[in-house]
Image (cartoon, rainbow, N blue to C red):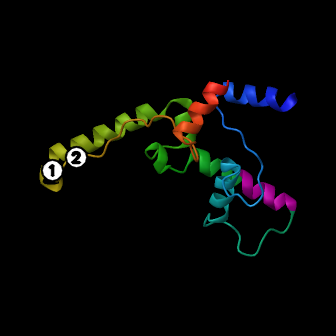
Amino acid sequence: MVLSDRHHGITQLGMLMSHSRPRVSNDNPYSEALFRTVKYCPAWPTKGFTSLVAVRKWMLTFEHAYNKQHLHSGINFVTPADRHRGADAQRLADRKAVYERAKRLNPKRWSGDIRRWEATGSVSLNPGKPQEIERNKDAA
């Protein structure tokens, strides 16, 4: 059966199935997260777009800024492009050195340790429940 072959391939990759349920906000978490991010972007035009070309131009500008300029809190304030290229570890090491130097130079300004500037582990949107992930591994 096509569905079971597809399901088997997806679970082998460690992915959870999407069942395309209507009115379920996390059915496609990646699309939902993108829609919300775009919708609340301060640069979103309040009066809409004048043409499809304008939409495409805006989205390309947004995508560039989001991936190559915006510092994401979920990955310790580096860009997704830095994370993808593996440049995040060096950026975070440099940042940690700056903070350590600042603390050494003026220890009275610090009440505790500096922020943790290590690279984050794996990141996902709406990660599955541990028992669901295990069930999918067993089914594979």
Residue 58 magenta-highlighted = yes
Task: Check the image and report above or below for 106 versus 100.
Answer: below
Residue type for callout 1: Asn
Task: Check the image and report above or below for 75 versus 109.
Answer: above
Q: Residue furthest bottom?
A: 47
At a point 67% along the width and 26% down the height, the residue shown is 139
Q: Main secondary structure of the magenta part?
A: helix
- Residue 3 at what x, y percent from top left? 83, 32
Front-most of 21 and 35?
21
Q: Quadrant of the N terminus?
A: top right
At a point 75% along the width and 31% down the height, the residue shown is 7
- Left or right, residue 104 beside residue 20: left
At a point 74% along the width and 26% down the height, the residue shown is 8
Res. 25 image quadrant:
bottom right
Per the image, the residue denoted by label 2 is 102
Q: Which residues are magenta?
A: 52-60
Per the image, the residue denoted by label 1 is 106
- Residue 50 at what x, y percent from top left? 84, 69
